[in-house]
Image: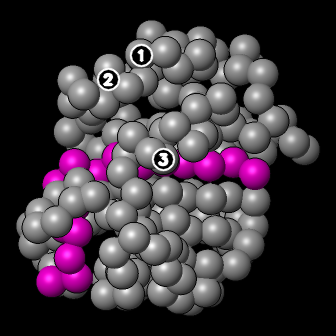
Amino acid sequence: MITFIIKANKARTSPDFLLKDLPGSGGRMDILCNCVESALLVSHGIRTDVEVILCLSGPPSPPRCIRMLGDRIKHLSPDERSTAILIKKALIAYRPGDEVESTPGIFVSDRSFEAVLMDNYERLVLLDENGEEYSKIPLNDPCFVIGDHLGFDEGDLELMKEIKYRMTISPKVLHASHCIVIVHNMRDKELD
């Protein structure tokens, strides 16, 4: 299983965002939708060996954690609007203190970014321009940590300073969803 943790600094933590304005009213919810689609979708199918964890830190009541399992998810289509609807349904289903399954394969809770990192610490791989090449990361079930358009704040960087594996995938700074596609491409070549 491969996991992608995406830190979303401004993404709304309530379902009151507008589907026709994901970047504005959703706090860049469009970035999360693109990441979900890049992580889980292939042409005419879903990657069943992938888990996506969205860590939402925007207003009005952070944190919210939305976890998506490729082997169980249903109704995921390759467009931002339908993905945003699934995220909205998860936020509607939220109950304090519990992880709730909102739709098949999608779970919501109030777990923090820190808690998600700690649960996966031994297999974390931070995408970092100064990291190692992919071939030097000796993990069968890596958990990649990716920031949104704002990246990570000082507190996040402090939490991640001891991460053992840091990987570079490009000499350029890329969109989060593009990083996911490149990681999948490298792993697909390795597994074939």
Residue type highlighted by circle 2: Leu
Q: Is residue 126 above or below residue 120?
A: above
Image quarter hosting the C terminus? top right
Q: Is residue 158 above or below residue 38?
A: above
Residue with the mark numbered 3? 116
In the image shown, does 117 or 128 lie closer to the viewer? 117
Residue 55 in magenta stretch: no
Q: Give the residue at x 70% y 78%.
A: 72
Marks 3 and 2 sit apart, C-alpha to C-alpha, by 14 Å
- Indicate the position of residue 16 as horizontal and vertical percent values: 15, 83
Residue with the mark numbered 1? 161
Q: Secondary structure at mark 1?
A: loop
Q: Which stretch appears magenta?
A: 1-16
Q: Secondary structure at mark 2?
A: helix
Most extreme residue toward the front, as rendered?
A: 97
Are the residues at dot 2 and dot 1 in contact (C-beta closer than 8 Å)?
yes
Residue 176 appears in view: no
Residue with the mark numbered 2? 157
Residue type highlighted by circle 3: Val
